[in-house]
Structures are given as structure tokens and as C-alpha cells.
Amino acid sequence: MCNSNLLVIQKLLSTNAYLGHRIPTSDFQGYLYGSRNEMAIIDLEKTLICLRRACNLIESIISAKGHLLLVNTNPEYNGIIQQMAKKTNRSYINHKWIGGFLTNWKHMRRVQKHFQDFSAHPNLKDAFTSSPFDYFPRFRKMQKCFEGIMTHNIPDCLVIINANQNSMAILEANQLQIPIVALVDSNIPNRLHKLITYPVPVNDDSIKFVYLFRNLITKTVILSKGSRGR
């Protein structure tokens, strides 16, 4: 192993990225180094290989003026994802996925425009709040899902932080043949793992790793945009 790889592996070790679950799924076996105290130990050399493949994909998408959609449903990671989206000028979703968000993209864009117009008219909002029908909570739920969307075009790639909680996003992206980069833990269901084009085997409960991943993706996007301009 070269010195640069060793340094990265040491960084990954410091984030506890190698800690898996007690019973890994069968498709995940190829990413394992072994087990300790009946807990799966993820092979970080394979994590590193998968990270590089994912970064190469993202680099090619950004170089071709493509757009990423960052997907997360863990409230603990909301700030991390928002920072990454802001620094890279990407779209993000920090809330529960709305069914049909990708497969019915044009309709969803019209719905987003409707909610933007609705937000700009507080009198209308007040009328809905005082209505006998409970419209406003539904409005807030939809608004939260749309607030991080920055593009009119369907995304060219999904970057998913917690694959287990985003099966609907994975199914829709797979149906539309949109590549998926996703952090996958050792308990990822086989049916989902098969649909993820660029899985990154890792302990997705590690906030330290999510910070490291954020920095890596941010750097990849910024450098790719810079090289595109030359």
C-alpha cells in the first residue's frame, strides 16, 4: 500500500468507518475484512476504492455541466448536507422523499413553482391557516422538500447519505437510469444494494465519516468546475 493510501486509511479508521452491524447482509460480504465481537468489520481498502470510483463519476458529471442532488433523511446530518450544497451550488433534500419526485419530475417542478408563489403571498397563507381544512401543515411539508432544489432539469446523479432510509429515491433513480452514489452500511438490503451503481461501504452512523465525505465531495466538485473553466 502506498503512503497516500495509508494516510487515507488512517483517516478512515479515525472516523470509525469500519464498524458494521452484527448481521451483515449477503451482498455486503464482499466488502468485509472480518468480524470482531460478532460485529462486522468493513475492509477500508475496499471503501477507499469505492470512494475513488464515486469521485471519478462526480468529476465526469460536473465536467460535463451536470447537476447533483444530495439526499439525506437523518436530521443529525442536515447542517452538513446544507453546507455541502451551498459550497458546491448543488441541490439537496434533507427531508422524507416524496414519491414521484424524479419519475414525475415535470409535475413536481410545477408544484414547486406553486408553493413558491404561495409563499410570496402571506394573505393567502393566513387564509389557508384559518381554513377548516388542515392545508398549512401539508404546505410546510412540501415546502421543506423543495427548499433545496436549485435546478429546473432532472439531476444527473444522486448522492445519498443513508441508503437504507431512501429506498424510494433509489428505486426512482434506478428506473430512470440515473447513477447513484450512496453510503451503504453492512445491513443494506440486497434488493437495494443491487440498484446502487456506486455503493460506498461504510458505517453510515459515523458523523465523523459524513464530515469527511462532505469534504471529499465538495473538493471534487470545486476542482472539477475549475478544470472545466480552463
Image: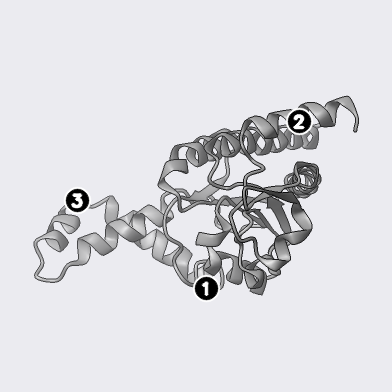
Q: CA distance from mark 3 to mark 1?
A: 28 Å
Residue shown at 47%/42% (left/top)? 77
**Of 221 and 11, which appears nearest the observer?**
11
**Of 138 and 182, which appears nearest the observer?**
182
Query: To which residue does mark 2 refer?
Result: 8
Density class for disc 3 (Cα within 10 Å; few <14, some 14-19, many ≥20) is few
Residue shown at 69%/34% (left/top)? 12
**Can you tell which mark lies on residue 104?**
1
Q: Is residue 170 above or below residue 3?
A: below
Secondary structure beneath label 1: loop
Q: Quadrant of the N terminus?
A: top right
**Of 76 and 148, which appears nearest the observer?**
76
CB-based contact (under 8 Å), mark 3 and mark 1 = no
Residue 123: x percent and y percent?
15, 54
Residue shown at 41%/50% (left/top)? 147
Which numbered disc, 2 or 3, marks the residue that appears first in the sequence? Answer: 2
Q: Is residue 46 above or below residue 224?
A: below
Density class for disc 1 (Cα within 10 Å; few <14, some 14-19, many ≥20) is few
Q: Amino acid at mark 3?
A: Pro
Query: To which residue does mark 3 refer?
Result: 122
Residue 102: x percent and y percent?
55, 67
Q: Amino acid at mark 1?
A: Asn
Q: Along the horizontal axis of the image, is 195 left or right of 102?
A: right
